[in-house]
Image (cartoon, helix red, strand yellow):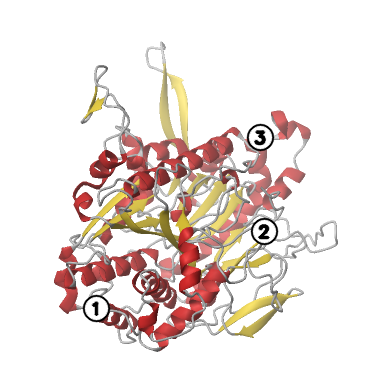
Amino acid sequence: MAKRSEALLNEPPADWTPTQAVDEPVINNPYDEPGQHWIYKDGVPLLMPGRRRASYWFKTKKTGSGQQELFAEEESDDLPLVNLLRRDVKRWRDVRYRGASNVTKDLLGWWSREDRPRRLFFCQKEAMETIIYLLEMAIPGRLSSTLFKNFEVGADDLSRLLKGNRPGFATDEHFFPRLVDPPGDKSYLPLQRLGCKMATGSGKTVVMAMLITWAFCNRGRNPGTTDYPNAVLVCAPNLTVRNRLQVLRPESPDNFYDAFDIVPAKYRELMGSGKVLVTNWHGFALKSPNREGDTSYRVVNKGEETPEAFARDRLGDLAGRVPILVLNDEGHHCWRSNPVSVKETDKGLTSEEKKALEEEAEEARVWLAGLDRINSAGLLGTGKPCILSCVDLSATPFYLGNSGYPEGNPFPWLVSDFGLIDAIESGIVKIPRLPVKDDSGSKDDAGRPDPKYFRLWKHINDNLKPEDKLAKGRPKPDAVFREAQGALLTLASQWKKRFEEIRQSSSGDAFIPPVLIVVCDNTDISEIVYQQISGEKVIEEPSSDGKSVVKRTVYQGNPSFPELANEDGVRRTVRIDSKLLAKAETEDGETKDQAAKALREIIDTVGRPGRPGGEVRCVVSVSMLTEGWDATNVTHISRLSHSRRGTLNIRGRWSSRFPRKMNQGLLLHSP
């Protein structure tokens, strides 16, 4: 494996200077293909015509053609398959999807109507068009029905991509795209995979609803074919996401098909021809050989589950509907380790970080092994896959360092890309603001402006005294809070200003409060930060008989920001305990921990009036927040940690109640 790049995905390049971004970064209509984009040349923002090419940043190996464009710096690598497919799909769109089924044409036209009550974003439509183009036209060998003669990605290239071989178009020497994920176990069939990169908050769940609609409506009109699946398995990384994805079940009372006007009236009854099963990866773990139903016995030994038994058990009714379509929400969790490469060392990581990496690797292994078993179950006969295709949707479809691949390398099966910068320029997500100056006038070693809150974690560590450090040089929690207090006060003041603006605009009516997030390096730091912000503390005191110690919760308030203080029965600030939350993310019935369930309910309902999380105004967490945290009212984030563990994954759509400029969040970054 190539040496891990010094410039990680969430770190700016070493020579990058924090500067004020453009005053108005939104330059495109969210419903149309982007027609211009910002680039930076020598620190100066330039508005360029045309759409930004699909690429990824901060890697040491090139994956594209190597043909550098004018402003494609050496940190940016091309995604050739995505860019070529964009041209083919655009041309197909321009001829109104010639060659597609009548149902498909109707649906694509329905989703593109400008008079829709809820218009769909261009990125949603393009992702959908790309998957349909591949599954209905390209992969089945029907490109000729488009009446085009030449293609950017033609039949020969598709054949190579589906076999995992290098395509004919220009790629990097060491990396090339493919549309198949071959398992290490040669007795299993290769898994066909298609990846869509979509910025968090750009509407991946709606895309999944559109894809299910395409499959079920076409199958309903053509029940004798298996080209269109009538069974969809939706896989999620945790219970939070799994519960949220129940809206993909057509029979659900709050389904997305009705809420977003996805299905034309004349096709609505056809949705009943299919079935959707929503599960999470925990269900793919192998059952004990000594288990019978829900009970374990010492005398029972069934042996390891066969792929067929596994598929029938996990799929239930879907087992009789193969081949099925699989949708991996947050698909970056589903990766296969590189068996011929040395994995990244965990030297320098904390025990919490090491454990997190181990858990991520185990999750990926169980998730993908489950799909391999289903795909190779033989329910259609030997050698015939039970999964038509596996579609991954993720904002960050990149390999982790412990995968055995270069950290940050994109999944090779990416076919569509609409990233965070594209989403910002199209006005789909919140606009982040970074600290670019302070009153100290400090400079870094190269003489560049270096505001202390921009590199907050470095600022904290640089100011620690020897007595502020624990063994191995790690900072004491109270010392971290002492050095971070100024930054937290600054951010909380910004949050309070936003809070008052929203409260005043509500004219006395109930309102959804903005949320401040503080991400801490470890649980010890998060505990002291939580106590200081919430004013809540658990103390120990002797029992009345003096024979034991009892714990009691006290509420001491927050003199500076009483709006964030907890009271008995009112939780305005919550702390996400990673161990407790992990218990809540297992399958239903596997935990009786009421505290874990209560925490999950709070986190699931932040920003929803009348629910347990409706009054939450501050969240103190350790490392990343889990996917599926569907809170659109997050406005301010501070990170009291180093940045090896990735970035936050939080939704951030525009609020319909407030002007855009009020939705600009402030991020105190700490690379």
408 left or right of 127 in image = right
Label 1 vs label 3, nearer the camera: 1
In terms of image quadrants, where is residue 222?
A: bottom left
Which numbered disc flags the more N-terminal residue, 1 or 2? 2
- Residue sitting at 16 percent across and 64 percent down? 273
The answer to whether the residue labelled 3 contacts the one labelled 2, judged by CB atoms less than 8 Å apart, is: no
| Mark 1 neighbour density, 10 Å: few (under 14) some (14–19) many (20 or more) | some
Residue 218 visible here: yes
Q: Whole-Å distance between the Cαs marked 1 and 3?
A: 63 Å
Instruction: Say which residue label 3 marks.
Output: 476
205 left or right of 56 in image = left
- Residue sitting at 27 percent across and 73 percent down? 262
Instruction: Say which residue label 2 marks.
Output: 59
| Mark 3 neighbour density, 10 Å: few (under 14) some (14–19) many (20 or more) | some
Residue 124 disc label: none
Which numbered disc flags the more N-terminal residue, 3 or 2? 2
Mark 3 lies on a secondary structure that is loop
Residue 103 disc label: 1
**Which residue type does callout 3 highlight?**
Lys
Q: Whole-Å distance between the Cαs marked 3 and 2?
A: 34 Å
Residue 432's spot in the image, x, y percent? 57, 66
Q: Nearer the viewer, residue 624 or 1?
A: 1
Mark 1 lies on a secondary structure that is helix
**Which residue type does callout 1 highlight?**
Val
Label 3 vs label 2, nearer the camera: 2
**Which residue type does callout 2 highlight?**
Lys
18 left or right of 252 in image = right
In the rendered image, the vertical position of residue 80 relative to residue 162, given as above or below: below
